[in-house]
Image: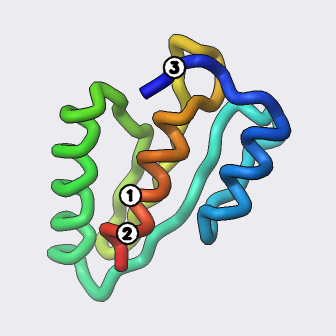
Amino acid sequence: MSRTPLTREETTTALAALSGWALSEDHKSIRKDFKFRDFNAAFAFMTRIALLAEKLDHHPEWFNVYNKVEITLTTHSAKGLTALDMRMAQLANEYAG
């Protein structure tokens, strides 16, 4: 999957299909807060994302407290958003149910 930075138009188009994700002010990352029924569900979600991150060699910035998981995605090597970020966001939405 490409690590080439997305244009603003590509970012806008991709983001429109990703429920709940918000673009940062600098247009270099996207972020979403997930809420689960309890810690076990949140941790199960994080485990699935961790395995995906290893498979894609693309790792999220995240924060977890009890049943909440905050995820920020960016491609540091591209200094912005790439198709990898959008793919990971799409799969995170699917994994969260």
Q: Residue furthest top?
A: 77
Q: Which residue is mark 1?
A: 91
Specify whether 48 is left or right of 89: left
Q: In x, y percent, where is residue 73?
A: 52, 40
Q: Gap in Å between the C-alphas at discs 1 and 3?
A: 17 Å
Q: Residue at x 39, y 59 (%)?
A: 92
Q: Quadrant of the N terminus?
A: top left
Scheme by which the image is coloured: rainbow
Mark 2 lies on a secondary structure that is: helix
- Tell me: residue 59, above or below residue 46: above
* Residue position for label 3: 3
- Amino acid type shown at disc 3: Arg
Could you tell me which secondary element the residue under label 1 belongs to?
Answer: helix
Asked which secondary structure carries label 3, the reply is loop
The residues bearing labels 3 and 2 have C-alpha atoms spaced at a distance of 22 Å
Structural distance between the alpha carbons of marks 1 and 2 = 5 Å
Q: Is residue 15 left or right of residue 58?
A: right
Vertical side of 45 occupied by 48: above or below = above
Residue 39: give x, y in percent of width and height.
Answer: 22, 75
Toward the viewer: 40 or 49? 49
Which residue type does callout 2 highlight?
Glu
Rendering coords of residue 2 (x, y %): 49, 23
**Quarter-of-image position of residue 24:** top right
Numbered label attached to residue 83: none
Task: Determine whether label 1 and label 2 are within 8 Å by CB.
Answer: yes
Q: Earlier in the sequence, mark 1 or mark 3?
A: 3
Circle 2 packing at 10 Å, graded few (<14), some (14-19), many (20+), is few
- Residue for point 17% across, 44% down: 51
Label located before the other in sequence (3 or 2): 3
Q: Name the residue tied to disc 2.
A: 94
